[in-house]
Image (tube, grey):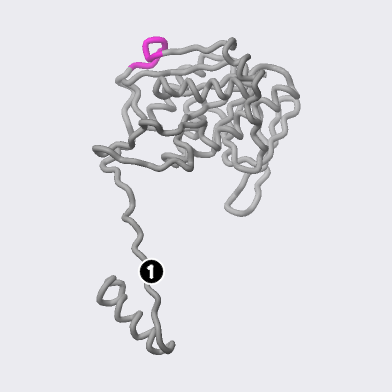
Amino acid sequence: MNIYVILKQTFDTEEKIIIKNGEICEEEAQLIINPYDEYAVEEAIQKRDALGGKVFVISVGPKRTAEALRTALAMGADEAVLIADEKIGSDENSISKVLASYLKNQTVDLILGGYFSVDNGSGQTAIRLAQLLNLPHVGSITKLAIDEGIAKATRDAEGDLEQIEVTLPALFTTQQGLNEPRYPSLPGIMKAKRKPFKQLTLDDLTIKEAELCPKTVRIELSLPEERKAGQLLKGEPTTQVKELVEKLRLNSNVI
């Protein structure tokens, strides 16, 4: 079974975001595998160990993304592919087309990816990729069982659960609760250095730059306003209510 994991490198969720000249400053920032993608890597490794085959991790992004891919190799993935080219951009439509251009020429039984990325949070790439490859797609899964080419998945449906059955090949996005991602071991880190790592550009694919038309454009980027200190109202409840209404009307223009 050939299992592909689409992976993205993101900021550490505890990292302080600094914006310079309208762009997020990456200097000295801690970068990690997108947390939801870690569930996908772990699930892929478990399914390979149970059913046989190989786990391939693939990412479209800047060259620094190699670090996240090597972490996935250290976790237990077999091979990695990085498609890095400044002409691609960061729009999910473009990234999904690049992934599809590569994967359509591969033998694929199962594709896994995170439910969404913690930086943009759009959750578009996997859905677009499934459509481009004409594959069944099940999102936000918390359980996955595979038997004789049939996948049975349980997915989170806004507080409820849905059970869906599809025929492989198919694409699934992973949610918290599916598994507990492992930490790379020292032997795993050493082995990762010797595992196949393919680095490609647009010139290595059959897709042309003209096909990469962004569907979304970021107009502006800014941090939220700093929170102001709260104010404690004193006196009797009737006095507090009167003062609160007055502040909401005059200071906040709420009422």
Q: Position of residue 1 (x, y in %)?
A: 67, 19
In the displayed structure, would residue 64 be above or below residue 238? above
Q: Residue at x 58, y 26 (%)?
A: 111
Q: Is residue 144 left or right of residue 60?
A: right
Q: Position of residue 132 (x, y in %)?
A: 47, 27
- In the drawing, does residue 210 fall left or right of residue 167? left
Q: Residue at x 33, y 81 (%)?
A: 245
Residue 54 visible in the snapshot: yes
From the viewer's side, name the closer residue of 119 and 183.
183
Residue 28 occupies quadrant: top left
- Between 222 and 186, the residue placed more toward the observer is 186
207 is within the stretch colored magenta:
yes
The answer to which image quadrant residue 62 occupies is: top left
Please provide percent x and percent y for residue 61. 41, 24
Q: Residues in magenta?
A: 201-208
Q: Is residue 64 left or right of residue 250?
A: right
User: Disc 1 on helix, strand or loop?
Assistant: loop
Q: Is residue 79 above or below residue 11?
A: above
Determine which residue is flagged by label 1: 230
Q: Main secondary structure of the magenta part?
A: loop
Residue type, label 1: Gly
The residue sitting at 54% across, 37% down in the picture is 35
In percent of width and height, residue 145 lies at: 72, 33
Closer to us: 133 or 123:
123
Tell me which residue sits at (68%, 44%) in the image.
163
